[in-house]
Amino acid sequence: MEPKRWVKVLFSVMGFIFGFTLSLIVFIYIFFKISSSKLVADLNLRLLAPVVIYIIPIALTILISIALGLGSAIMFLRIIKKQQQSNKHPKINPYIVLFILFLLPVLYLGWVLIPYLEEYANVVSHSYKVTASDCAIVENLMLKEECYINSVIRSKDSTACDKIQTIETKDTCYNYAAEFLLDTSYCDEISDSYYYKYKCYSDVSIKTKNISICENDYIKNNSTHSDNCYIEYATFFDEPEFCEIIKDPNTKKRCIEGSKLSI
């Protein structure tokens, strides 16, 4: 038996909403992860026009979500057609299963994600002038900490990093503070002593064109960090003479070859 027209329309719409909403949630999550990552800041995407970091990803997200929504609509429709044509009576009604599938992402979007997006939009709208005091009113912890990072970048508010609770985010904030305020004292505050801290000193040495930063006590006490700092500086500024300071022969060779390639 063929399902009634209104049943087909209803479940097609439900399928589309399910696929569209689920896809939207996934892409929004990915977008927030990428937009708040160190990679984005390193590429200075935070300082580019909103069309690059907001409008284009949002447009692509909507298009892909529509495509997946249509795919889900076809899937829902096939399931109810198969059920109508079958003489068997399954223990779990597929109509109920489909309805629950439809309901879960919709409820999540309405109760969790939309309020979060409203708060995010409020933070972003003030991101060009935000200060640490502005961020204090933000309720969501992740958005609040993102706001504090923005206050360092936009307003050069160096007090913001002290207010961040998450260790990893605080390290990221101190790294930005050091880069934007050109002050290695913020690198001293970074807790990650393996990679992040060294990279902070290295980045500031390049931004200030000050090779002596590669000779501070923290970097000098670790030959790997010291060599990496010199190689990054030498290859960035095409100054192979600094490659001679490098202790590890393989790293020294890479440094000299890298400098030649960049000439």
Image (cartoon, rainbow, N blue to C red):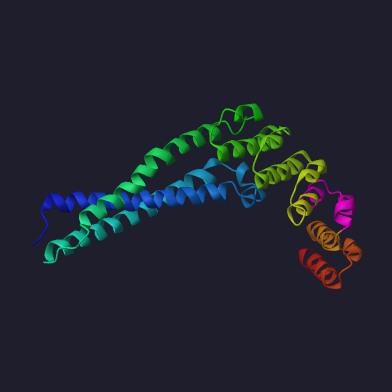
| Relative side of 187 to 57, left or right | right
Residue at the (18%, 59%) spot, across then down: 80
Q: Name which quarter of the figure residue 178 lies in.
A: top right
Residue at the (61%, 38%) spot, across then down: 145
Q: Over which residues does the magenta segment extend? A: 202-221
Residue 205 in magenta stretch:
yes
Check the picture and name the quadrant holding the C terminus. Answer: bottom right
Q: Position of residue 55 (x, y in %)?
A: 48, 44
Residue 100 in magenta stretch:
no
**Overall secondary structure of the magenta section:** helix
Q: Nearer the viewer, residue 194 or 49?
A: 194
Q: Count numbered badges in the picture.
A: 0
Q: Nearer the viewer, residue 47 or 162?
A: 162
Q: Farthest front residue?
A: 91
Q: Farthest left residue?
A: 1
| Relative side of 241 to 195, left or right | right
Residue at the (82%, 46%) spot, across then down: 208
Residue at the (15%, 63%) spot, across then down: 89
